[in-house]
Image (cartoon, coloured by chain):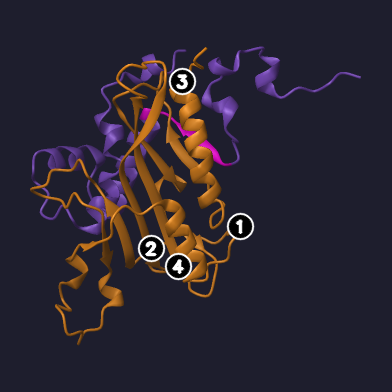
Amino acid sequence: MAIKLPNFLRRGQDEDELDLESLLDPERFEFISIEEGKQLLDQQARQYLNMSGEEFARRYHSGEIEDYEDSNVIHVSMLLPFWDYPLDDQKNHSR
Amino acid sequence: MTRRTTPDRTFQQYAALIDRALGCIASERLAFVHPRPLEAGPIYPLLLNRNQPVALRGDERLQFVAGQHLRFAYGSDLATDTFRIELVNYWYVLSDATGREVLAFHWTPEADPKVMRTTPHLHVGSVNIAKDAPLAPKTFNKLHLPTGFVSIVAVVRFLIEELRCNPGIRSGRRFSK
């Protein structure tokens, strides 16, 4: 009878070469792309601040936010790294 | 021989610890942005339930938001083949069932100090402040009560021990904001 190996072992990779999807339980972790992250920012900027993610990012970085300590502003601002990534999403998902 | 580590493996070890803590009170998943390759320098958000509130089960109807910003850094100046994780920002926010903020633990050490407090602090939501409180009842929620660094483990322990959130019970309830 064939022994069923976990996916990461079947790939025959050295453990140092394993990627995150192999290492972490998919029921506990999800991996989202930068593009999905930008959509998340846009969705929550609209939900919490009634503006688009793009507008929020622009206003945040140009000092146009009235109260940076407002709880909704802080909540949405934690998603700004998605917007600010200098990395090219296409390139980053081509591996 | 020095064992080579990768940002992926470093993250895996760190994330497993965070999940172990948050898994005590929430069944929702942790979301992590996954550009390739993970590298030293950029900030990577780690978000419980995509930064949306999760309902906590317990004596009180509470919602919880938790997230961290992480950065990978080389293990030391001389060892560029090992990585460690720097916690850049955290935000752990407790709200009531309607989304009104009750407690918020913030730490944003790299924020612009002209517009944000950069030391770790706690906000007490206005919903939890008596209108006749002796100290600034209308603006007390804006005060930054100093806390020192607060770990996610400490917050989860507080939620379970003090606020009686049921540990180990997966919550399927969600409250709208």
Amino acid type, label 1: Arg
The residue at 40%/33% (across/down) is A36
The residue at 18%/43% (across/down) is B111
Answer left or right for A46 relative to A24: left
Say if B152 sits above or below B103 in the image: above
Q: Nearer the viewer, residue B44 or B162?
A: B162
Work out how far the residue at label 1 is from the one at label 4, CA to CA, in angstroms: 14 Å
Say which mark, if any, is on residue B62: 4
**Mark closer to the chain start, 1 or 3:** 3
Work out how far the residue at label 4 is from the one at label 2, CA to CA, in angstroms: 7 Å
The residue at 53%/67% (across/down) is B165
Amino acid type, label 3: Thr
Tell me which corner region of the image, top left, top right, bottom left or bottom right, holds residue B94: bottom left
The residue at 27%/32% (across/down) is A83
**Mark closer to the chain start, 2 or 3:** 3
Disc 3 is attached to a residue of which chain?
Answer: B
Q: Position of residue B153 (x, y in %)?
A: 46, 53
Q: Which residues are magenta?
A: A28-34
B174 is within the stretch colored magenta: no
Residue designated by label 2: B94
Answer left or right for A21 relative to A82: right
Residue designated by label 1: B170
Work out how far the residue at label 3 is from the one at label 4, CA to CA, in angstroms: 38 Å
Q: Are marks 1 and 3 on the same chain?
A: yes
Q: Nearer the viewer, residue A38 or B29?
A: B29
Indicate the secondary structure of the residue bearing disc 1: loop
Q: Colour of chain A?
A: purple
**Mark closer to the chain start, 1 or 4:** 4
Residue designated by label 3: B6
The answer to the question of whether label 1 and label 4 lie on touching residues, with beta carbons closer than 8 A, is no
Crowdedness near tag 4: few (<14), some (14–19) or many (≥20) residues, C-alpha within 10 Å:
many
